[in-house]
Image (cartoon, rainbow, N blue to C red):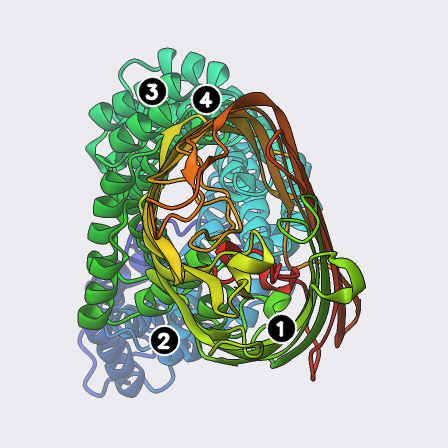
């Protein structure tokens, strides 16, 4: 393209850099004189054609060129040459027309964007030459059009090295800035003629070129990820555009450096974008006071609300991290109000801060506060599920098992995951609604079914229903390994009871052999006990041996069952008597109840237990007690419980008067938590018994068992047992009490009331004490030894009992359970445990 002000016509090259207009030359004076002189001469008949054309014709050629009609000028000159064969055409005219005609062709090629044609028409340029302006700009346009980077680079280096006109040089530099690549700009920047040119126009353009060269090198380094080189270029630059871009480049990597670049850009004259970058850098660096100061310095900035919201949001996040949840919620809410686009993130921060506060309160066992905060957090969608989960756990820990169960239930039905299943099962267990949870598990599927089973197992485990726990979760409790293996036992027991020789003095030995088989939650046992009883009569007359076979069954479950049936005694003069007992126990939340129906032997004396022949040889005695017993325990909180029991029974025997008994008792105890103990309780108690008649004698019709009409006992007891499933298991019970007894006088022969005299009767009172210790020790995976010792001393009687046992468990057992403790064959009330 031509620069403005350049005349379209061309003139002969005079060595100048600017095309100058050329006027039409006047006629030569000498030539004019000759023409004038010849005008007055006489005519000549045969004229020789003139050697040169008329001056007017020559001037016409110049005129056509001056008017830009170079084709016509070239044609006229050619016609003159042909007409005037001997004419020596002036060199300047030939050059004038040729140059003009060439320039015309160049313009035509430029208009058609025939860039190769332009370059072919232009005359070669010397290496050290500065072309005329028209040719210079035409060559520049053509090289631009061809996209020849090497040619462009060589062109600008040549012309800027040789052209001296300041205006042309400044214009060329400006054009080079937008045309050359990075390498080309670097070559131009290195031209001494430019760097040493002090003309303001050239110096200004050169400075702009240096900035563009640095910018292009910077952008190349940035695109290549070479932040080190890009940073080095920025460090040496004063270009606000480059400094600002460097600030954005380093913003996510080095906020401090980014802020320094933005500050430098602002100092160099950068505008709003750099100011915004400085605020962003302060925000990224967590320097919120600096960010707020920068925001305040630009009150008219269009993004002011957004940046202020970002500052609030950043401070809210810091407040959340520092635990100031109230400040975090306040700032996050303000951020959402300033910039609706930030509302989702702001609500996440606010909800997260509330959830953090709820978690902290939960960890401090402040469950009510934790629940309230979690419910507030649940209003924020991004943390709703987590907050509702926390609220449900807090409710569970606060004791609101039903509320927790409802919360976990809703969470599970919305999305059945492990945590909601775990919480739902646990809360349902504590609320006593595991059955409902199990129904939902069957309907909804997912992990809840397994969690419910695990809770059933956990309840059973902590309640001591180890077979149930093993059946529901076979692999959950390593301590239950072998709990369902068969057990073979052998025990030997001894009893020494003080009293009158031959009557209620009794020394007894018992050996029990048994086998216990487990199937699921059911335990079956068969056994045989051999009794050796001695009343101490002279000559061994009071020694008797008896056998007592038995079978027992127990089942764990929501309602635990136990039953036993046996014969006692087999041997002696009278037929064996059937004995048995059935019992059921159930927990009602934290409370417990059980009931027994039984037919038991009385073991107070040989007469009561096995019978004896009277003076006429008739077998009498063998008293059996048939009755009911109910027992209940109420948990009143704080580790305290009240237990009440009531019993009714009827006692009958061979040739023994019938007797009825009523008994009852109440106790209160305090549970004491102690490491290693399954339970440790102590407290006061009261017991009473009342028989219709006193049959505590050995004449015919009497049963030979303690049967007061009033028996009251009040005292203090302590009961303890170590944790099961270890290698040791110890159970201890001790009591001290004050007893009062009233016994009515009895007929000597109660079956015949009109015979004999009245015997016995009276009142007594005193202090009594009892202790019972039982222990078991696992001496190997398959071998368990056990022992027990109990002693009772009272105004009415004294009793000492002891026993040892050994058990073999084929396959081994991981730990001991209460059934491993020795059962006293002289205490029928302990024979089954529901």
Of mark 1 and mark 4, the one earlier in the sequence is 4
Q: Which residue occupies 42% across, 49% down?
A: 749
Tag 4 or tag 2, which sits nearer the N-term?
A: 2
Q: Relative to 297, is 750 above or below? A: below
Of labels 3 and 4, earlier in sequence is: 4
On-image quarter of the C terminus: bottom left
Residue 828: percent from left, percent from top:
51, 58
Q: Are marks 2 and 3 in contact (CB under 8 Å)?
A: no
Of marks 2 and 1, which one's residue comes earlier in the chain? 2
Q: CA distance from mark 1 to mark 3?
A: 57 Å
Camera-nearest label, 1 or 3? 1
Q: In the drawing, what numbered circle is on residue 319?
A: 4
Image quadrant assignment for residue 102: bottom left
The residue that disc 3 covers is 331
Q: Is residue 368 left or right of residue 241?
A: left
Q: CA distance from mark 2 to mark 4?
A: 67 Å
Residue 773, given in percent of the width and then of the height, sits at 70, 46
Per the image, the residue denoted by label 2 is 115
Residue wearing tag 1: 481
Task: Tell me the element at label 2.
Answer: helix
Q: Disc 2 to disc 3, how far (Cα)?
A: 65 Å
Q: Which residue shows up at 66% across the image and 62% down it?
A: 816
The quarter in which the N terminus is drawn is bottom left
């Amino acid at each position: 393209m031509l620069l403005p002000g350049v005349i379209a016509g061309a003139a002969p090259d005079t060595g100048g850099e600017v095309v100058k207009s050329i006027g039409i030359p006047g006629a030569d004076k000498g030539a004019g004189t000759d023409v004038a002189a010849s005008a007055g001469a006489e005519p000549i008949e045969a004229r020789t054609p003139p050697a040169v054309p008329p001056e007017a014709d020559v001037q016409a050629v110049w005129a056509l060129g001056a008017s830009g009609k170079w084709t016509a000028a070239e044609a006229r000159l050619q016609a003159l040459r042909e007409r005037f064969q001997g004419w020596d055409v002036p060199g300047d005219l030939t050059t004038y027309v040729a140059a003009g005609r060439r320039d015309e062709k160049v313009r035509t090629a430029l208009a058609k964007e025939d860039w190769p044609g332009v370059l072919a028409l232009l005359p070669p340029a010397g290496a050290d030459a500065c072309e005329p302006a028209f040719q210079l700009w035409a060559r520049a346009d053509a090289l631009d059009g061809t996209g020849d980077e090497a040619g462009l680079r060589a062109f600008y280096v040549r012309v800027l090295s040789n052209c001296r006109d300041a205006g042309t040089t400044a214009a060329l530099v400006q054009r080079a800035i937008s045309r050359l690549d990075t390498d080309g700009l670097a070559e131009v920047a290195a031209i001494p003629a430019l760097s040493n040119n002090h003309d303001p126009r050239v110096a200004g353009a050169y400075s702009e070129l240096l900035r563009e060269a640095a910018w292009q090198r910077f952008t190349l380094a940035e695109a290549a990820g070479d932040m080190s080189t890009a940073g080095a270029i920025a460090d040496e630059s004063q270009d606000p555009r480059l400094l600002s871009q460097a600030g954005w480049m380093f913003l996510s990597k080095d906020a401090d450096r980014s802020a320094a670049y933005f500050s430098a850009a602002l100092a160099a004259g950068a505008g709003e974008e750099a100011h915004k970058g400085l605020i962003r850098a302060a925000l990224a660096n967590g320097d919120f006071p600096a960010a707020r100061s920068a925001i305040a310095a630009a009150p008219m900035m269009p993004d002011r609300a957004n940046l202020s919201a970002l500052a609030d949001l950043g401070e809210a996040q810091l407040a959340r991290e520092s635990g100031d949840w109230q400040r975090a919620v306040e700032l996050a809410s303000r951020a959402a109000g300033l910039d609706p686009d930030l509302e989702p993130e702001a609500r996440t921060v606010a909800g997260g801060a509330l959830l953090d506060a709820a978690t902290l309160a939960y960890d401090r066992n402040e469950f009510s506060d934790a629940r309230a905060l979690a419910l507030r957090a649940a209003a924020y969608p991004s943390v709703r599920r987590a907050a509702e989960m926390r609220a449900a756990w807090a409710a569970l820990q606060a004791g609101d098992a039903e509320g927790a169960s409802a919360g976990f239930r809703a969470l599970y039905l919305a999305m059945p995951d492990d945590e909601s299943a775990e919480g739902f099962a646990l809360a349902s267990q504590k609320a006593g609604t595991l059955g409902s949870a199990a129904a939902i598990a069957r309907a909804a599927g997912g992990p809840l079914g397994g969690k419910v089973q695990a809770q059933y197992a956990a309840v059973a485990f902590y309640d001591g229903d180890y077979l149930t726990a093993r059946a529901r979760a076979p692999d959950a409790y390593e301590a239950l390994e072998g709990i369902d293996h068969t057990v073979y036992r052998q025990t030997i027991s001894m009893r020494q009871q003080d009293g009158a020789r031959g009557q209620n003095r009794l020394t007894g030995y018992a050996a029990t052999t048994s086998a216990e088989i487990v199937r699921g939650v059911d335990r079956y046992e068969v056994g045989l006990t051999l009794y050796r009883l001695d009343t101490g009569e002279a000559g061994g007359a009071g020694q008797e041996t008896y056998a007592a076979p038995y079978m027992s069954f127990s089942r764990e479950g929501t309602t635990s069952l136990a039953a036993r049936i046996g014969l006692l005694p087999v041997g002696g003069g009278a037929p064996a008597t059937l004995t048995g007992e059935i019992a059921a126990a159930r927990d009602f939340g934290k409370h417990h109840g059980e009931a027994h129906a039984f037919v038991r032997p009385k073991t107070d004396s040989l007469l009561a237990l096995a019978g004896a022949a009277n003076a006429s040889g008739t077998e009498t005695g063998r008293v059996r007690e048939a009755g009911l017993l109910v027992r209940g325990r109420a948990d009143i909180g704080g580790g305290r419980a009240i237990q009440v029991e009531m019993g009714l029974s009827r006692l009958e025997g061979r040739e023994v008067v019938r007797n009825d008994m009523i008994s009852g008792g109440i106790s209160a105890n305090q549970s004491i938590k102690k490491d290693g103990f399954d339970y440790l309780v102590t407290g006061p108690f009261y017991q009473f018994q009342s028989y219709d008649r006193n049959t505590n004698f050995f004449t015919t019709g009497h049963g030979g068992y303690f049967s007061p009409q009033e028996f009251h006992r009040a005292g203090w007891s302590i009961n303890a047992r170590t944790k099961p499933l270890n290698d040791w298991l110890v159970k201890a019970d001790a009591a001290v009490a004050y007893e009062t007894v009233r016994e009515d006088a009895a007929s000597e022969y109660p079956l015949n009331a009109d015979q004999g005299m009245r015997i016995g009767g009276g009142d007594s009172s005193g202090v009594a004490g009892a202790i019972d210790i039982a222990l078991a020790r696992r001496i190997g995976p398959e071998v368990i030894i056990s022992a027990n010792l109990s002693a009772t001393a009272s105004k009415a009687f004294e009793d000492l009992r002891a026993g040892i046992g050994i058990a073999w468990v084929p396959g081994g057992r991981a730990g001991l359970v209460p059934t491993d403790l020795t059962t006293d064959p002289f205490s029928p009330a302990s024979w089954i445990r529901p």
